[in-house]
Amino acid sequence: MLKKVFASAVFGVEASTITVEVNVDGGIGYHLVGLPDNAIKESNFRIAAALQNNGYKIPGKKITINMAPADLRKEGSAYDLTLAIGILSASNQIKAENLEQYLIMGELSLDGSIHPIKGALPIAVKAREEGFKGFILPSSNAKEAAIVDNLEVYGVDNIKQVINFFDEGEPLEQTIINTREEFNKRLEFPEFDFSDVKGQESIKRCMEIAAAGGHNIILIGPPGAGKTMLAKRLPSILPPMTLHEALETTKIHSVVGRVKDTGLMAQRPFRSPHHTISNVALVGGGSYPQPGEISLSHNGVLFLDELPEFKREVLEVMRQPLEDREVTISRAKFTVTYPSSFMLVASMNPSPGGYFNDPNAPVTSSPAEMQRYLSKVSGPLLDRIDIHIEVTPVPFEKLSDERKSETSVEIRKRVTEARVIQTQRFSESETVHYNAQMNSKQIRKYCGLDGASKELLKTAMDRLNLSARAYDRILKVSRTIADLEGSDSINGTHISEAIQYRSLDREGWLG
């Protein structure tokens, strides 16, 4: 007897429906076809034990299972439950008249309990698109899949529950989530707050500008100056995620199995990979592509601590995604694209020893050593970082000051107001949402200067030997400073503040 059961495979952040055809015939044998990987080939041992321990068995007949489309590679253990239900149905051990209305996935344990799967959210989105009535999956993934409306989601803990549902009509408990309500509930404030930071007022101002315009930023300063502390607090002043952004971010984390029992992600991601990371782990890829750190930080912050310690080729592969805000991984048979629109925050010591121009420094570095150290970060990468700021250690008087500094809530309010201005400005563009994303044409349109401002910028570029690439960056940052002040036009004050944030462009900065 032939039976069809439905499952799904995830490619990139999209899912494709897989039809599992199970045919039980006279003879003996177990044939699994349709490009399954080793984890799926081994599933018959797990299925046999799980069925045996729940009072069922794999029939001693010829079983042929085809996973269509047969030219698409399938991977992982998430098809165990699909195959098991297909075998029971095709061998008439259970009645399953409405089997084709449901998409079924889950990894089986030998006792029949069901383990979580990856990619539940994109699979649920696809199931709704294809018109399935419901989605049966492990209960630990149910909240994540229930984000999708107009689809019945049933979380199960054991294969026996699924068997009884189809065979005896025993109802399963449907997981229902009010997505918008759940999302608003989860918008609580992060644990890190800017009020914890003593002093560093100019750096906080810098962080506010970076957050308001979505600008990439690099912090340069000696050990213990507070670079990491400041970076960790940046997500707390970014505007709250929209529901669309939250769904997009949850989808990526779902693909790598990072969404636990929480459902929708409401906090912006903050990723801080170690400097020993490989380029595949950072950008994504592998023989069977997975998202990398830059995609996991989509709509959030990617923090690279001690930037020159990263391998140069790792930093170079980031250049294209920083520009395109997506990363495309090509293989012989398919291509996947992951979104990667993130804010890059980098930190570095000004010299290998960490102390630069400090007469009391315990370690000093020669100019040649410093040049070698700084040259690890290439010009084209620095070109994509809008703001460079020097962080100096906080004096004792500021550290011991009991007064509370400005909280993240107050800063976030100003940042959100500036973002609203930008959203209106770029409302006609599908790809540009904030100032950092502007191209040359938009810079000319929205960053016009009066005569005095133009003269000021020209003088600064000549006197400080600023490189040509700094010109666009200064205009973008000036536009954001003007937005924070609610000003329609850019004036000399905005330009002069933006010029201060280009430390690494100055020739002779080492001198």
Image (cartoon, rainbow, N blue to C red):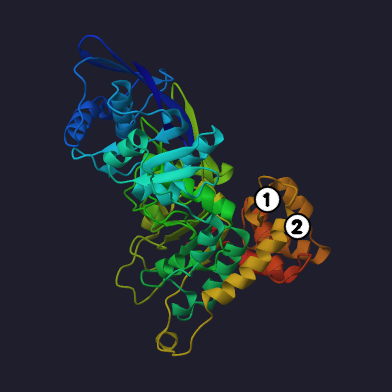
Q: Check disc 1 and give the amino acid type.
A: Met
- Most distant residue in the right direction: 451
Question: Which quadrant would residue 262 be assigned to in this image?
Answer: bottom left
Of callouts 2 and 1, the N-terminal one: 1
Q: Mark 1 points at which residue?
A: 438
Judge by depth and name the residue closer to the eye, 420 or 315.
420
Q: Check disc 2 and give the amino acid type.
A: Cys
Q: Position of residue 363 (x, y in %)?
A: 30, 68
Q: Mark 2 points at which residue?
A: 447
- Residue 218's place in the image compared with 123, above or below, is below
Give the CA distance from mark 2 to mark 1. Answer: 10 Å
Judge by depth and name the residue closer to the eye, 419 or 66.
66
Q: Position of residue 344 (x, y in %)?
A: 50, 55
Q: Which residue is drawn at 43% across and 66% down?
A: 232
In this rendering, does residue 154 appear at all? yes
- Residue 303's place in the image compared with 33, above or below, is below
Disc 2 or disc 1, which is closer to the eye?
A: 1
